[in-house]
Image (cartoon, rainbow, N blue to C red):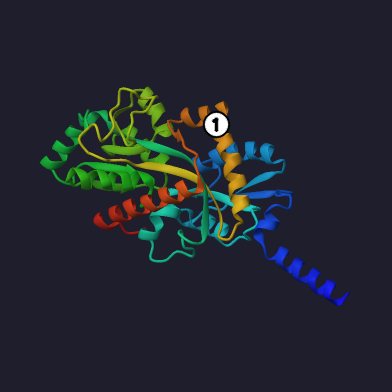
Amino acid sequence: MKNFRLALGAALAAFLACPVALAQGGYPNKTITFVVPYAAGGFGDIRARQVTERLSKSLGVSVVVENKAGAGGVVGTNAVAKAAPDGYTIGMGNLAPLAVNRALMKKLPYDPDTDVVPVILLEKAPLVLSTHRSQGIATVKDVVAKAKSDPGKLTYGSSGVGGAHHLSGAMFAHQAGIELTHVPYKGGAAAATDLVAGHIAMMFEMGYAALPAIKGGKVQPIAVSSTKRLALLPEVPTLAESGLANFESYNWQGVIAPKGTPREIVMRLNQELNAILRQPEMREAILSQASEPVGGTPEEFAAFIKAEAAKWSAVVKSANIQPE
């Protein structure tokens, strides 16, 4: 009897110590919290709610969005990194907190490489480079020529230091060998308003935000930051087509989980989210905003983050970008 109890105790201990066994024990069976590291109503928040609504249905449990904004996405990402690795707290993983802030900030409360687990890359959102029509700039060559004739006079706006708008402009200036003056705003909407008013010369802006002003004839789109032209703006060339070889820039979003989350849970989420991205309604929601649905494996997302971190770290260093 004693040997039996010892054997039973050992077996139970092994079971409890094995995350694989726990992962197979009916996950999920309670509410999942999905952390968005930005304020409600923004690009990431809207996409998160579209995705989690469908994820709730496919998993059969509630998936609740929780906004934890602050420090360029650091606050929310840290909340995911520090959560219990049981699959019941996951979150949105974005460009700044995973790939940029490590170069921009002196210290992060989490390690983007080891404290979170990539689950899936949901989408890549290209940016549109638009100019105010008063500038008389219709092409990238025009920008380069004007900037070289009067270095530093041309201004470009952004949603703030270290964001996709700013970094795209910095990479553009570096690759083109020109000097531009960065004008940071507290949010993309404020910058876009000043672009329309002619207070700044140009701006890299996400497609969904740029389209209304473009369609209204208020700004002139001259290039897109993706490797292919956008279906919604087929007449606008890519920056690579315009003479900046290999230029590629996106504001991207994926899903992450805390370090130590069992592989089976990660793969279950990956499978469900890939299926959601294949749904016609979800694809249309992404494509209609001039973004690209992606999907794929956790390993592919991890490799993408690594490549993005290397690229933007080089841009931050070369442009000597300092945090606000």
Which residue is nearer to you in this view: 273 or 202? 273
Residue 134 higher or lower than 307, as above or below: above
Q: Nearer the viewer, residue 292 or 192?
A: 292
* x, y percent for residue 95: 42, 49
- Say which residue appears at 33% left-offset and 31% top-offset: 228
The three-letter code of the residue at mark 1 reads: Arg
Q: Residue furthest left?
A: 149
Question: Going by the picture, which residue comes out furthest to the right?
Answer: 1
* Above or below for 165 versus 228: below
Please name whichever residue, 36 or 40, is drawn nearer the observer in this view of the structure.
36
State how many labels appear. 1
State left or right for residue 149 relative to residue 324: left
Quadrant of residue 282 in the image?
A: top right
User: Residue at point 52% right, 57% down?
Assistant: 116
Q: Position of residue 2 (x, y in %)?
A: 86, 77
Residue 215 percent across, percent down from the top left: 38, 23
**The N terminus: image quadrant:** bottom right
What crowding class fits label 1: few (fewer than 14 Cα within 10 Å), some (14-19), or many (20 or more)?
some
Q: Is residue 161 left or right of residue 147?
A: right
Can you identify the residue that label 1 sits on? Answer: 278
Check disc 1 and report its element: helix, strand or loop.
Answer: helix
Residue shown at 29%/55% (left/top)? Answer: 314
The residue lying furthest to the bottom in this view is 2
Q: Residue at left 58%, top 35%?
A: 275
Q: Quadrant of residue 319?
A: bottom left
Q: Which quarter of the figure has residue 11?
A: bottom right
**Could you say where residue 42 lies in the image, as x and y percent from the top left?**
51, 41
